[in-house]
Amino acid sequence: MTRFIDEQRQTYGVGSICKVLPIAPSVYYAHRRRQNAPSARAQRDDTLCTRIRQIWTENFCVYGARKVWHQLKREKITVARCTVERLMKRMGLKGAVRGKQLKTTRPDPARPCPEDLVHRQFRAPAPNQLWVSDFTYVSTRQGFVYVAFIIDVFARVIVGWRVSTSAETAFVLDALEQALVQRNPVGSVTHHSDRGSQYVSLRYTQRLAEAGLVASVGSVGDSYDNALAETINGLYKTELIYRQGPWKGKRDVELATLKWVDWFNNRRILSSIGNNYTSRG
């Protein structure tokens, strides 16, 4: 009956039709309101979409469905992961996907190197037991800049970093000095890197010894021997550099890196530490 009224209302009007049919206009309009009201699922989807977009935006627009789902769980919002995937697809939101990384460090075959003390076992029982180091490059309008990181393996936290227009030894030394000041480690800390000339230089190895750190160096041409550090480089490039460029110069990269490191250390979800993201290290 309501379908008939819908079909004829433009010609005769609702009131006139209801006088002929055994139905009150109020009944017809109440039925229309129920039909037009969004379903409970649609209302919940709208609420979830708002929060999902906020989480995605607040985290450098790099979270995929899995990390968004974990963040919702931390906020005590019960939702299936497939629902998050469906809603993110509907909104056109995607996580960052890492691509192939390029090597930046150049080994110095003539210089003697410390042994590999890690053997690809990137695990530590406590903070300040094992640090890994590496650096990468960023193309800017003013030329290349280089970004070095030192990571505490225990909780995957960045303890030192530096941005420079030069890839000389002093640049990676600055990152090391920041880590030493920030952590002030007591006892033996293993410092692992690749065989880049900066890390096996006399100045760098002497500073490690002075600070009581034990040097460890991976083999030549094998990215797996420093895989954790290269993973952090890859995340940095994928989550920040590739998504927010082009870059003007060192100053812009430095400011953006500062914000990214703060987010990475304090708010980013990491599956390698049980999808944790706070108080790491």
Image (cartoon, helix red, strand yellow):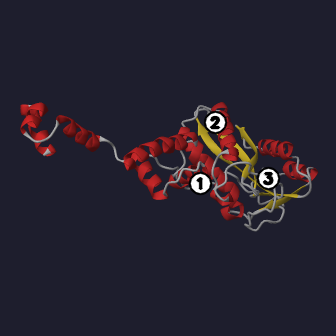
The percent coordinates of residue 224 (x first, y second) are: 67, 64
Kind of residue indicated by mark 2: Ala
Q: Residue at x 73, y 57 (%)?
A: 107
The residue at which mark 3 appears reads as: 199
Image-based side of 109 in relation to 269, left or right: right
Task: Residue 10: give its label.
Answer: none
How far is mark 2 from mark 3, CA to CA? Answer: 25 Å
Kind of residue indicated by mark 1: Gln
The percent coordinates of residue 171 (x first, y second) are: 77, 42
Q: Are marks 1 and 3 in contact (CB under 8 Å)?
A: no
Where disc 2 sits, the SS reads helix
How far is mark 2 from mark 1, CA to CA? Answer: 20 Å
Q: Nearer the viewer, residue 15 or 102?
A: 15
The percent coordinates of residue 140 (x first, y second) are: 59, 36
The percent coordinates of residue 188 (x first, y second) are: 90, 58
Q: Nearer the viewer, residue 239 or 14?
A: 14
Q: Mark 2 or mark 3: which comes first in sequence? A: 3
